[in-house]
Image: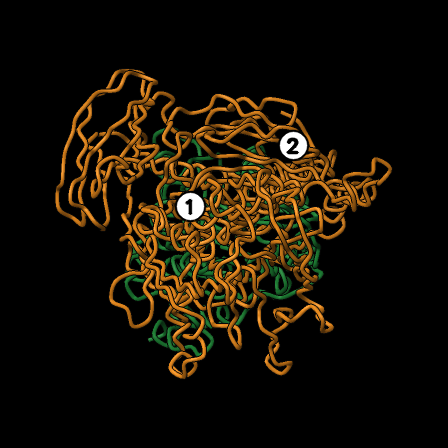
Chain colours: A orange, B green
Amino acid sequence: MNWISALGPLQWLLLLAVPPAVLSLYFLKLKRRELSVPSTLLWRKTLEDVHVNSIWQRLRKNLLLYLQLFFLALLILACLRPGWSGQGRVGERRIYIVDNSASMQATDVEPNRLEVAKRKIKELLSDTASDDVGMIIAFSDRADVRQGFTTDRSRLMSSVDSIQATSHGTDISEALRAAAGLANPGRSSFDSLNDLMVADAIPATVYILSDGAFPDLGDFDVGKLKIEFIPIGQPKSPNLGIVSFSVQRNEDKAGELEAFARIVNHGQVDADFSASIELDGKLLDASSGSVEAGKETGLIFELKGVDEGVLKLQLESEDPLAVDNTAYAAIRSPKQISVLLVTPGNNALETALKTPRVQQVASVRVESPNFLSEPGYRTSNTDASFDLIIFDQCSPMQMPECHTLFIGSLPPIRPATASDSGTDAKNDENSNKEWVFGTPQGPAVIMDVNRSNSITQYLEMGSVSIVEARTITPPESGEVLMTSDLGPIFAVAPRGAYQDAVLGFSIVQSTGDGVGVNTDWGIKRSFPVFVYSAVEYLGGGITESSAPSVQPGWPIGLLLSNRFKDFQVVGPDDQKTDLTRGDESRYTFTKTDVPGIYRVFAKGVEKPVESFCVNLFSSRESDLAVAESIGMGYEKVAASGSTIAARKETWRWILLIGLGLLVLEWVVFNRRVFI
Amino acid sequence: MAENSTLASPKSTMALLSPETMAKLERMELVSRKIFRGRMKGERRSKRKGQSVEFADFRNYVSGDDLRFIDWNLFARLDRLYLKIFLEEEDLHFYTIIDDSMSMDFGEPSKFLVAKQIAASLAYIGLCRGDRVSVSSFETSATPVVVRGKASAHRLLNHLNAIDCVSTETTMADSIKKFCLKNTGKGIVVVISDLMSKAGYEAALRMLVAREMDIFLIHLLSPEELNPSAQGDLKLVDCEDGDRREVSISAGLLHRYQQTLAAFIEQARSFCNKRSITYVPARSDQAPDVLVNEYLRGKGLVR
């Protein structure tokens, strides 16, 4: 039992002055009913000996006075806030952090871990005092403040109810930062040690209700936070999970696909499993195997005659977590990219575009520069039906509405009125603020290649000699891809939704006499790699046979064909999301909460132009082992069990009893009960 | 009938005597433990020797005695003159004094009404037996109504009806003193009172004792006095002198009250017993005819 004074000294003085006041009131004014009696003779005699100790006689057996004094005593006791250390009670400022990541869907506890966590929070909430403030944060791989600090318990409860399970991964650091931001006042800078905190830190207790499937937090500074970790779930839960599933074209056998999956056993015992693979809902193949405890195994399915479709791998295993027993992969149809090559004749380039690798992903049409001046090209917006137009030794009258690659030529001067912000490509002689082109000089040796860009990522240009080249300086938003001793000679820059790449030297130079070779790059091994990379990157990047996969909740960048303006993404739950083209050609799609296949439809096209998968693929989430402690800053926070040692408040109960006494006193006064 | 007129009296809130009661009372008579001298010829044996038919004694003849009472048969045998003495029969003086202090006007029915009923009953018995009946209250003790004969019953009852409780300064002792001065005769005196006099009742009773009368004290108490039902913090107001007593009535206090009451009754009884006063406790919720028929008969006042 311990005590906390709820009042200041002056208030105590006032309160303690009340009992004597009540007593004196009883002496001074005891309201008496007048009653006429035949004679007070007998009463006088009766009272004679009573008068000897009359003061105490008056007070003796006066139930009402006793009740009042008892009430006051309880009031004073209540203000001392007596309490004791008990279980299930909590402090004053509390932050409840609930894990709603994928692993919390595990049903190793009834009904599942998340519901158990929510129930525990509610139990904690129901034990809190009414003036305590609480805050609810749900976290998976991101934090979601469900309810800011409030004393309203019903709001806290309803916000707990609103927490839904997700298939996301787990990252508690954001949630803890949110909690810490409220408990520890921010500094304007974390770099300067001289920067003092501007406000007092408010201590708070953080209850983390999680299975602990998240990495240690490294140097996270808990500051004034008191961390309580309440593990949820059975410590040793068996679980088989698919941690990867991908589809690749068999390089050796054309037209065959290989599906590869990794299956991890997180249980304590060896486990047998059977797996089935379905294509668009039809069973293709099945396999079975076993995994040793704590180990993983691979599964390979060879798929013949599969051109495109959605693959679903289903693991037949009875384990608590269902979300990791299913994996999806989508096979794309080949030849997605439409490329137009406009050239007066370039064997090296044409050959490079005919490699099987390029043919697999792109369909190439070759035209002569005359094609550009044909009226049909100008009027029918032919360029809009291509993803990429390669201008070799020629340039159009105006920039086409697609990605472009200029080889040995320059983008046309565009009318000033048509200028989109910062995307104009103009000739070097003019006051071009954006693209700056130098005059042809030679010879040139390539000094540096930008390895961070996917076009030039794999290029080895050291042995390439160039007869004549001009410097290419891209606008600010652009990127220099190759630098020669003369200066930058290859650059790429965005133009609205499109990318323009300009190579400052031609491969061959067609003249009236024939074809002159400007560089030996065309016969180098790096040239087809360059062409393929350029087609892949500028053509929209849809070159892989299998669709990209992200973890639930993570954004996916979509490089979509510029032939269409509006797209619609249909998720596995048939939820439709419209995508509209922004300034960037890259679309970012964020509503990837549900695992499964997402299809991207272009307006007016029946078949999906792109698809991607959302798979859990997280060994950490599949591992249902419950952490016994979590690394928090420089300390370890051990699991505190399902109960929390905290102060139990009783003064409200005493006040309630006091009120009951007041009622009893009222009854006694009215009924005139006497002892 | 006189009885009927009494009942029809406008002042009577309740008939002092019902016809049935009267019929019962007519068969009774008042009994005195002492033999008094009456004033007139009556039905009571007197101390005086007289001319009744009942032989009392012989005594020696002395000169001057009435020769008619000489027992001549005895003279013939003994040759000595003896006088034959007969018992004299005289009337009985019966006095009733009712306490008319305000304290008597309590209870339901009020003590005063019950007192008047008792007084009326006893007086009627006396009237039926030809006794000299005198009824008075403390206030009118100096001027009592004195009646004789059954025919005067209605006058007596009217008088009884007429008297009322008065808030007077006259104490019991003063009233009895006046009574004693006025009524020199001897006889039975019945005092009906609750004895709730702060000045005390002892002096008054002593005066009566000094008159050598046959004294009956009917101590009439109401149920409210015997078992108070009041509760709580009260301010008790004495209806006679306005005396106020603040009490917080509790079970303990009520117990103490009962002790005090018992002591008070016992003190009165003891005082009376020592002085040959017949103490008759009575409750105002008891029917008066029951009191008269059974209780007073047991005490020897009526027969």
- Residue position for label 1: B301
Q: Quadrant of the N terminus of chain A?
A: top right
Residue located at (52% from left, 46% from top): A521
- Residue position for label 2: A220
> Whole-Å distance between the Cαs marked 2 and 1?
112 Å
| Residue A343 vertical position relative to residue A278 in the rendered view, above or below | below
Which quadrant of the view contains residue A324? Answer: top left
Which is more toward the observer, B278 or A437? A437
Using the rendered image of the protein, determine whether residue B277 is visible from the camera's viewpoint.
no
Residue type pointed to by label 2: Phe
Disc 1 on helix, strand or loop?
Answer: loop
Residue B170 at x, y percent in the picture: 70, 59
| Residue A294 vertical position relative to residue B279 in the rendered view, above or below | above
Direction front: furthest residue: A513
| Residue B175 vertical position relative to residue A466 in the rendered view, above or below | below
Residue located at (63% from left, 45% from top): B248
Label placed on residue B202? none
Q: Is residue B263 left or right of residue A296?
A: right
Using the rendered image of the protein, determine whether residue A111 is visible from the camera's viewpoint.
yes
Residue A519 at x, y percent in the picture: 55, 49
Mark 1: few/some/many CA within 10 Å (<14, 14-19, 20+): many
Residue type pointed to by label 1: Leu
| Residue A157 vertical position relative to residue B178 in the rendered view, above or below | above
Disc 2 on helix, strand or loop?
Answer: loop
Q: Chain of mark 1?
A: B
Q: Is residue B27 left or right of residue A659?
A: left
